[in-house]
Amino acid sequence: PTVYLNGQYLPLDQAKISVLDRGFLFGDGIYEVIPAYAGRLFRLPEHIDRLEASLKSIRLNSPHSREQWAGILEPLLEPGQDQYIYLQITRGVAPKRDHAFPEHIEPTVFAMCSPIVPLSGRDSGVKAITLDDTRWALCHIKAITLLANILLRQNAVDQGCTEAILVKDGYVTEGAASNIFAVLDGILVTPPKGEEILPGITRDVILELARTNDIPYSEDIISLEALKTADEIWLTSSTREIIPVVELDSEPVSDGKPGPVWQKMHQLYQEFKK
Ligand code: PDD
């Protein structure tokens, strides 16, 4: 496969960066994951908006204009395929290791494309556990520094679960690599945007679909207690779309099957992404 690195398209095994890259030494960078359906980038302007917001939050100037990104990413796509682009920008290669920003360095820009493989078992639902949200205070930045998320996800996998649902001060924030929705008393609820969660693009699509299809919804905090009695729980992301959770902390969610609101939203999403 061909990847993009700093202006060049290269075979994967020829794409190399310095060990002094601040992404490698410090995790000093941000990323995006952008799905493409039938070879077309999905919600590109929204992903670029979030990319620019992440860059601004870490005080990195965008190395390319909004218009340039599509031209950089599109050559990586295979025509007609469902794939996702991973795009990463780090602060770049500095002459020495020093926490403070180095002067006069160029960001490192890397992008690659992978097939979207639907999560096995998605249609029958997955298991999740709740864990204390041990991440940092700026979770709205799509930072490559993902050690807490990795440990949380692995803890879930070690317990036979697909995702860790994170809880901060008694309230649910999101999954280790996904946003969360719950159906509570017939209303689709997802936590509001803020520094505690990543503003998911899939999350926004779902809220838009709820609005245009008269599905009652609200952006509101969800206590762990409320989650435990939810009629439905979903996890959402660009690579996995909408996944129903049918078992939470070893207890069935409702009757232990994906619910009717998920069925409906899943169908709407499949239509919408075409
Ligand atoms: N993760 N919250 C977190 C912490 C995430 O890492 C992700 C996505 C989301 C969902 O955002 P979106 O709908 O824009 O994909 C929410 C990506 C897919 C990843 O890290 O691979």
Image (spheres, rainbow, N blue to C red):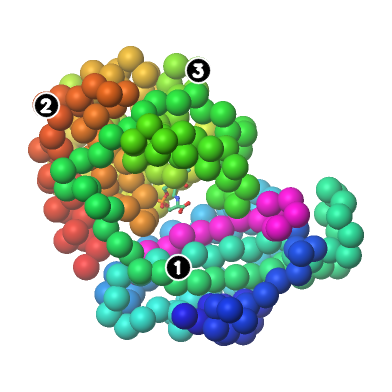
Q: What kind of element bears circle 3?
A: loop
Instruction: Name the amino acid type tagged 1.
Output: Ile
Question: The C terminus is located in which quarter?
Answer: bottom left
Q: Earlier in the sequence, mark 2 or mark 3?
A: 3
Rendered residue at 25%/63% (across/down)? 273
Which mark lies nearer to you, 1 or 2?
Answer: 2
Earlier sequence position, callout 1 versus callout 3: 1
Q: Residue drawn 14% across and 53% down?
A: 267
| Residues at marks 2 and 3, CA–CA distance in whole angstroms | 28 Å
Residues at circles 1 and 2 in contact by the CB criterion of under 8 Å:
no
32 in the magenta segment: yes
**Residue drawn 12% across and 46% down?**
264
What numbered label is drawn on residue 255? 2
Looking at the image, residue 59 sits to the left or right of residue 12; the answer is: right
Residue type at mark 3: give it. Asp
Which stretch did the figure color magenta?
A: 23-36
- The answer to whether mark 1 and mark 3 are in CB contact below 8 A is no
List the residue tagged with mark 1. 85
Measure the alpha-carbon separation of dots 1 and 3: 34 Å
Lateral position of residue 91 relative to residue 88, left or right? right
Q: Is residue 248 above or below residue 43?
A: above
Q: Nearer the viewer, mark 2 or mark 3?
A: 2
Closer to the camera in the image, 211 or 244: 244
The residue tagged 3 is 169
Three-letter amino acid code at the position of disc 2: Asp
The answer to whether residue 251 is left or right of residue 90 is left
The correct choice, above or below, for 260 with respect to 68 in the image is: above
The local crowd at label 1, few if under 14, some if 14 to 19, many if 20 or more residues have their Cα within 10 Å, is many
Query: Percent x, y for residue 247?
Result: 24, 29
- Residue at (60, 52) in percent of width and height: 144
